[in-house]
Image: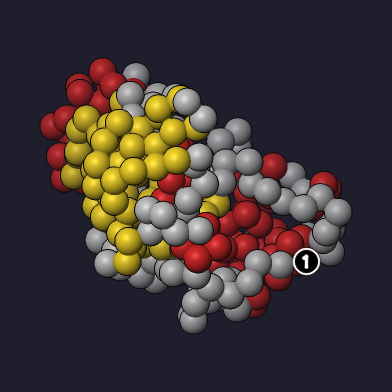
């Protein structure tokens, strides 16, 4: 579903990605792991066309998007959940949920979303500014599920959350994978990611330096300790 080849990206004069290559099959969940500044978030932003300049190839379902405008990339069925969440503080939780346009068929209904995130139903009339960090993160994820996006790009969705909320998000992401969504997840919490992912890509200095399959985790933990300090 996603093929990235020789991807180079820049912010202004800063060259961030240096020839990144990775693949994601339909229905897979993969992670981009690495230390802060390695280029993981930039990779997600590049996929949706939000870097200043990029070269190489990014193909989504066979469609080349490297020079495509971000709004056209989204229409290919891409949902991006950024680390900063992007909640509109003056709108209610439900208004935030209903705001994004449809980008494809098969989006989850509001009722399905509230069944997955009961907290959002309880807080549906609360302003975005009054939601807790965990509720804002649930809303940021829920918002892209309604659009019909089938490729989800999730950036640090557990950042700063209490362990109980991390478990809630873990169950939700697992359910999305079971429903057939394709997911690319940037995640600092390796223990959270390890339970969910089919494959891990380790990013360092803007390139993929190692690929670890789920079944290889036990044998390659020493290497992961070296790269991640987990």
Classify the position of the N terminus by image quarter. bottom left
Q: Is residue 212 left or right of residue 195?
A: left
| Residue in the picture at 58% in, 75% down | 102
Quarter of the rendering containing residue 138: bottom right
Q: Is residue 29 above or below residue 143?
A: above
Q: Is residue 174 left or right of residue 111?
A: left
| Residue in the picture at 50% in, 40% down | 52
Q: Position of residue 53 (x, y in %)?
A: 45, 40
Return the residue at label 1.
Answer: 95
Coloring basis for residues: secondary structure
Quarter of the rendering containing residue 165: top right
Q: Position of residue 59 (x, y in %)?
A: 30, 59
| Residue in the picture at 26% in, 55% down | 3
| Residue in the picture at 29% in, 51% down | 57
Residue closer to the observer: 155 or 41: 41
Classify the position of the C terminus by image quarter. top left
Q: Is residue 192 left or right of residue 108?
A: left
Asked whether residue 149 is in view, the answer is no
Circle 1 crowding by C-alpha within 10 Å: few under 14, some 14–19, many from 20: some
Q: Position of residue 97 (x, y in %)?
A: 69, 65
Element under label 1? helix
Q: Position of residue 132 (x, y in %)?
A: 74, 44
Residue closer to the observer: 112 or 205: 205
Q: Is residue 214 above or below residue 106?
A: above
Q: Is residue 160 above or below residue 35?
A: below
What is the total number of numbered labels drawn onto the structure image?
1
Asked whether residue 102 is in view, the answer is yes
Return the residue found at the far bottom: 105
């Amino acid at each position: 579903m996603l093929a990235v080849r020789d991807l180079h990206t820049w912010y202004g004069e800063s060259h961030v990605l240096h020839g990144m290559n990775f693949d994601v099959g339909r229905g897979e969940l993969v992670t981009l792991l690495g230390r802060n500044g390695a280029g993981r978030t930039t990779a997600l932003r590049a996929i949706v066309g939000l870097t200043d300049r990029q070269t190489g190839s990014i193909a989504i379902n066979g469609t080349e998007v490297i020079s495509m405008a971000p709004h056209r990339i989204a229409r290919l069925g891409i949902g991006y959940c950024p680390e900063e969440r992007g909640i509109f503080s003056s709108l209610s939780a439900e208004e935030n949920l209903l705001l994004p346009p449809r980008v494809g068929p098969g989006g989850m209904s509001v009722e399905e979303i509230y069944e997955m995130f009961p907290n959002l139903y309880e807080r549906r009339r609360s302003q975005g500014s009054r939601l807790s960090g965990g509720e804002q993160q649930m809303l940021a994820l829920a918002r892209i599920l309604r659009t019909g996006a089938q490729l989800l790009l999730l950036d640090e969705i557990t950042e700063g959350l209490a362990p109980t909320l991390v478990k809630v998000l873990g169950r939700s992401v697992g359910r999305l994978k079971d429903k057939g969504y394709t997911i690319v997840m940037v995640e600092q919490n390796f223990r959270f990611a390890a339970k969910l992912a089919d494959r891990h890509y380790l990013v360092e200095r803007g390139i993929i330096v190692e690929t670890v399959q789920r079944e290889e985790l036990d044998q390659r933990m020493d290497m992961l300790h070296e790269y991640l300090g987990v």
